[in-house]
Image (cartoon, rainbow, N blue to C red):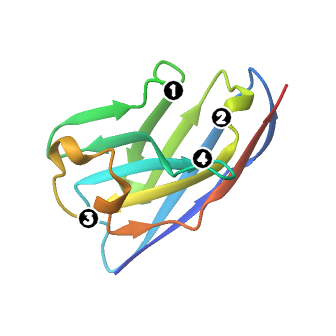
Amino acid sequence: QVQLVESGGGLVQAGGSLRLSCAASGRTFSADTMAWFRQAPGKRRDFVAALSWGGGSTYYADSVKGRFTTSRDNAKNTVYLQMNSLKPEDTAVYYCAAALYYLGTSYYSASRYNYWGQGTQVTVSS
């Protein structure tokens, strides 16, 4: 089993930056795809970004492309989401997710992921 623990959320002003961390623990940290999702009150859980080793690709939602960057530090068993040029519309609870297998074009689908973090609140003020 793999446990994911998120941290780094908080309150920032529009235009600011924030880095979220997702620390993995367990017998091993082995997943083909790591992803970030977010959910605002009353809305669906939406895809933000994903990193796939099987596909050798990084994917981003159009709303965050050019502003957010996801990366992985294998030595620290940690995945990061660097968030720059934050906007009030980025306000949401952010979740880290992991999939054991190559997802192909399904990287955007929350139902495909096997492990989830507890979520961390990100609030962007204007």
Does label 1 or label 3 sit earlier along the sequence?
Answer: 3
Kind of residue sitting beneath label 2: Asp
Where residue 61 sits in the image (x, y, percent)? 42, 31
Question: Looking at the rendered structure, which numbered label has been put on residue 30?
Answer: 3
Q: CA distance from mark 2 to mark 4?
A: 13 Å
Where residue 9 sits in the image (x, y, percent)? 70, 50
Image position of 24 (left or right of 51)? right
Does label 3 or label 2 sit earlier along the sequence?
Answer: 3
Kind of residue sitting beneath label 4: Leu
Residue at horizontal 55%, vertical 48%? Answer: 38
Q: CA distance from mark 1 to mark 4?
A: 14 Å
Q: CA distance from mark 1 to mark 2?
A: 9 Å
Does label 1 or label 4 sit earlier along the sequence?
Answer: 4
Kind of residue sitting beneath label 1: Val
Residue at horizontal 66%, vertical 52%? Answer: 42
Identify the residue position indicated by label 2 in the image.
90
Kind of residue sitting beneath label 3: Ser
